[in-house]
Every structure is written in C-alpha cells, then in structure tokens.
Image (cartoon, helix red, strand yellow):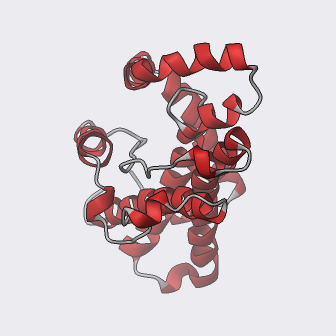
C-alpha cells in the first residue's frame, strides 16, 4: 500500500479511539462518570492503547498483507450500577461504538465525494481505506461474541438464566475470536460487508489499485 499505510494506520487508530470515547460518553450521559474520572474521555491516544488490539493484531494484518484489518483500543471502564436500567444502559453504551464507526465511515466517504480529485492521491486512498476499515470495525464489534459490543446488545434480550450462561463465554472471548479468524469465519462475514460498502458508498474510484 506504500505511502498510504502510515496514514491509514493513523486514521484507523483515531477511529478506535473515537469508538471507545463514544462508549464512555454515552455511559456518562446515562449517569456513569467512571470513564470521565479515569481520564478516558480524551483524544490523547496513550490511555487508549491496548498491546494486543492496538499494536500486535494490526501489525499482524499488515505483515501478512491481509485485505482486512481488525483493531481495538483498551476498553473504556463502565459501571452499569449507575444506570437506571443496567442491561438497557449497557446496550446503548455498546451500540455507541459501532454507530460511531458507521458515522466516521460516512463522513470520510462524504469528504471523498465532495473533494473528489482535489485531494492528493495518497490522502484520497487513505480516506477510502479508512472508511472501509470503519465498516470492518463496526461489523466486527457487532459480532455476538463476549465481550464484543454485539454481546452487550444481545444480553439485553436474554433471560436471566440464559444471560448467566452467555456471560461465562467472556473468559474465552479472545480465543474464540482468534479461532474464528484462523478458520476464516470472520473473514467470510467481513468481506461481504466490505463489498457492500464499496458498492453502495461508491468507494471504488477512490481505492488504491492493489
């Protein structure tokens, strides 16, 4: 990807930081000041760095020339005890992250369609790829695998007994994610989402010729 690579990395990292800030901001609006008190409602990247999700996993995708990149920042602390309805509150907090990635993808796409060829080629390509990576981040985080955001949304609709069993999966969540990556299952989910975004957001003219 050449000169675009560092710009794509910066834009993706900015996106995962925005994703986490969105969680914390919605939690704050619902009455939980935990993230604010711990200094996590900040665009300073340092408090958001997760060794695996922010550094190791993206580096692996880059080294292997993967067509997708999955990344995450250190989760923002949330205390549902502050919420009037804890399960519903956690659902809205969880949904805020993927929703933010969708908004960022649309903003980047809008900028590309407005600015068009006036942008330098490397910036045009970087924005297009970052828009697609935001779609990936949205879809990936909506997978119903604890502790991904999708599991918090699903939890809102489970009975108490089913919820207890579901939450026990969380200790194995990272292993499940890596297992599904290795088996290609997550790729099979993400690639149609990417193709859908390229087609319906009309991103193809802005993508680098690989």
The reply, left or right, for residue 209 in relation to residue 135 is left
Residue sitting farthest toward the bottom: 118
The reply, left or right, for residue 18 in relation to residue 102 is left
Residue 56 on image: x %, y %: 23, 41
The reply, left or right, for residue 194 in relation to residue 51 is right
The quarter holding residue 173 reads top left
The reply, left or right, for residue 177 in relation to residue 96 is left
Q: Residue at x 28, y 54 (%)?
A: 49
Residue 166 on image: x %, y %: 59, 18
The quarter holding residue 190 reads top right
Q: Residue at x 32, y 67 (%)?
A: 7
Q: Is residue 174 above or below residue 86?
A: above
Q: Nearer the viewer, residue 158 or 208?
A: 158
Q: Residue at x 26, y 63 (%)?
A: 46
Q: Is residue 86 above or below residue 178?
A: below
Residue 31 on image: x %, y %: 63, 60
Residue 129 in sight from this viewpoint: no
Quadrant of the rendering where the N terminus is positioned: bottom left
Q: Nearer the viewer, residue 81 or 159?
A: 81
Q: Nearer the viewer, residue 81 or 44?
A: 81
Residue 138 in sight from this viewpoint: yes
Q: Residue at x 41, y 65 (%)?
A: 37
Q: Nearer the viewer, residue 133 or 78?
A: 78
Q: How many numbered marks, from 0 up?
A: 0
Residue 12 on image: x %, y %: 40, 59
């Amino acid at each position: 990807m050449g000169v675009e690579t560092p710009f794509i990395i910066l834009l993706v990292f900015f996106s995962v930081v925005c994703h986490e800030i969105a969680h914390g901001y919605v939690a704050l609006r619902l009455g939980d000041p935990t993230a604010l008190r711990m200094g996590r409602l900040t665009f300073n990247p340092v408090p958001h760095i997760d060794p695996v999700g922010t550094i190791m996993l993206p580096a692996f995708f880059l080294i292997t020339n993967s067509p997708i990149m999955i990344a995450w920042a250190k989760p923002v602390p949330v205390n549902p005890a502050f919420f009037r309805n804890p399960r519903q509150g956690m659902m809205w907090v969880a949904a805020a992250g993927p929703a933010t990635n969708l908004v960022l993808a649309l903003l980047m796409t809008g900028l590309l369609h407005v600015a068009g060829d006036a942008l330098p080629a490397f910036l045009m390509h970087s924005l297009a790829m970052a828009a697609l990576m935001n779609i990936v981040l949205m879809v990936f985080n909506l997978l119903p695998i604890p502790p991904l955001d999708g599991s918090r949304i699903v939890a809102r609709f489970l009975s108490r007994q089913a919820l207890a069993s579901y939450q026990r999966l969380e200790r194995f969540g990272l292993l499940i994610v890596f297992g599904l990556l290795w088996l290609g299952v997550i790729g099979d989910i993400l690639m149609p989402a990417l193709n859908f975004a390229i087609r319906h957001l009309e991103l193809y003219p802005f993508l680098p010729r690989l």
